[in-house]
Image (cartoon, rainbow, N blue to C red):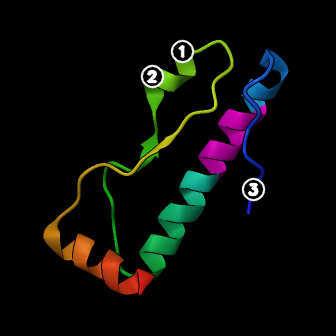
């Protein structure tokens, strides 16, 4: 599991964004491997405007079928 980004200082912000982007891609691939697609999966763009961003991941909306597959995969 990746380290949580510390909210202190701008020196951490670039790494936080990089970790968030890597995590989104890892999640996208893991979901694809399970036959699930979340079209709106991304890091929250508004968070990038903060002085020291540690952007959250937006999962977005998905179809009922994708939600059911996700629930089954998590069981």
Please say whether residue 48 is one of the residues in the magenta stretch: no
* Residue 21 within the magenta-colored segment of the rendering: yes
In the rendering, at what x and y percent does residue 23 appear?
61, 54
Q: For mark 2, give the secondary structure.
A: helix
Q: Which mark is residue 68?
A: none
Q: Which residue is mark 3?
A: 2
Among the 4 quarters of the image, the one containing residue 21: top right
| Distance Cα–Cα, label 3 vs label 1 | 23 Å
**Residue at the farthest left position:** 64
Label 3 crowd (10 A; few <14 / some 14-19 / many >=20): few
Q: Secondary structure at mark 3?
A: loop
| Comes first in the chain, label 3 or label 2 | 3
Is residue 11 positioned above or below 60 on the image?
above
Mark 1 residue element: helix
Q: State the residue at coordinates (55%, 22%).
A: 48
Say if mark 1 contacts mark 2, CB within 8 Å: yes
Confirm or deny contact between disc 3 and disc 2 (CB under 8 A): no
Residue at (29% x, 80% y) in the render: 69
Residue numbers of the magenta segment? 15-22
Q: CA distance from mark 1 to mark 2?
A: 6 Å
Q: Quadrant of the C terminus?
A: bottom left
The quarter in which the N terminus is drawn is bottom right
In front: 33, or 55? 55
Residue at the spot 79% in from the left edge and 22% down from the top edge: 8
Residue 46: numbered disc: 2
Give above or below for 16 relative to 9. Answer: below
């Amino acid at each position: 599991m990746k380290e949580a980004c510390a909210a202190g200082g701008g020196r951490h912000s670039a790494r936080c964004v990089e970790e968030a982007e890597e995590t989104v891609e890892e999640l996208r691939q893991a979901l694809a491997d399970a036959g699930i697609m979340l079209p709106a999966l991304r890091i929250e763009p508004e968070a990038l405007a903060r002085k020291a961003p540690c952007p959250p991941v937006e999962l977005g909306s998905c179809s009922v079928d994708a939600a059911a597959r996700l629930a089954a995969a998590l069981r």
